[in-house]
Amino acid sequence: MGEIIKGKPVADSITEELIQEVELLSVRGITPKLAIVRVGARGDDLAYEKGALTKCKKVGIETQVVELAADITQDDFIAKIQELNNDASVNGMLIFRPLPQQLDESVIKYIISPEKDVDCFSPVNVGKMTEGDETGFPPCTPTAVMEILKFYDVDVKGKDVTVVGASMVVGKPVSILLLNEFATVTTCHIFTKDSSKMTKEADVVVVGVGVPRLVKENWVREGAVVIDVGINVDKDGNMCGDTDFDNIVDKAAMITPVPGGVGSVTTSILAKHVIKACKQQHHVNSKEIETVMN
């Protein structure tokens, strides 16, 4: 049976470091703050918001939930984002997406301050991620994937990695982050002729498409590492991932479960990005804090 690599130990490790960083910032009279911008009350947004608020409270990050009407106009929405941009007490902003149809994300993504954009909505942060500029903020979920690989000593340098999914939420950014670590990356999408052919040849498979149990046992080679980013509910009402976990677990060297895998690390990454944004805005030297922590 392959090793089931859970997200909780990764999240706990990150959280402990963040608690120390917040304590050291507090000595300087600095308290990190996150503003969560939610339009309407979608169930998935509320679930993530609850987890984010719990994580921030544990770490010591202040939070502000900005709940806006589902029918808010674009002008009013932009005005609220600009207000938060100008609020010096707010270090990080998380805007839940997708936004309602009346709000044009292609316009709004240029409004949010890149310095406060802790989940890579701004094209500036997309560009920084592509260039490997560590002052930027890559998306939280793909970053959680990388943290899990790092925590469990999966070195992707020179490895063949297949990413199933090419969205800006998971597929594209995780492919870029893997390339930044010198993996050899193949990205599969809806027009890929035979995704299973690509995954069979991979040392590491990352799946994030939102299709329950898409990746079957015969898609994965013996001894591969499988990272499942999908969160779905099957026809029987059970939560499951994008991989056929029960049939792959005996074949893979390592595999993340759903639930309890990548999703449980994501809020820790969000908190980490808020603290990073706070330090950058206050010109706090990260190496100085690391020295004190060590």
Image (cartoon, rainbow, N blue to C red):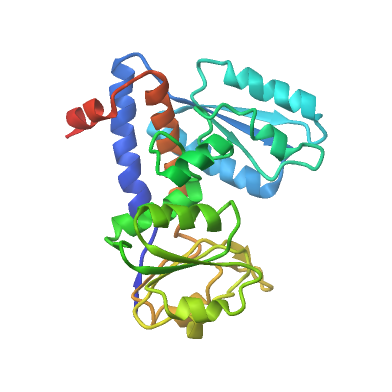
Residue 225's x, y, as percent?
38, 71
Q: Is residue 88 above or below residue 121?
A: above
Q: Quadrant of the N terminus?
A: bottom left
Residue at image point 34% right, 68% down:
159
Residue at image point 44% right, 60% down:
261
Residue 165's x, y, as percent?
57, 64
Q: Is residue 89 above or below residue 5?
A: above
258 or 289: nearer the eye? Answer: 289
Q: Is residue 266 above or below residue 19?
A: below
| Residue 154 quadrant | bottom left
216 or 198: nearer the eye? Answer: 198
> Can residue 119 be seen in the rendering of this structure?
no
> Can residue 82 be seen in the rendering of this structure?
yes
Q: Quadrant of the C terminus?
A: top left
Residue 186's x, y, as percent?
48, 67
Residue at image point 27% right, 60% down:
153
| Residue 106 quadrant | top right
200 or 31: nearer the eye? Answer: 200
Q: Residue furthest front?
A: 131
Q: Is residue 53 left or right of residue 40?
A: left
Residue at image point 43% right, 43% down:
131
Count of marks, rendered view: 0
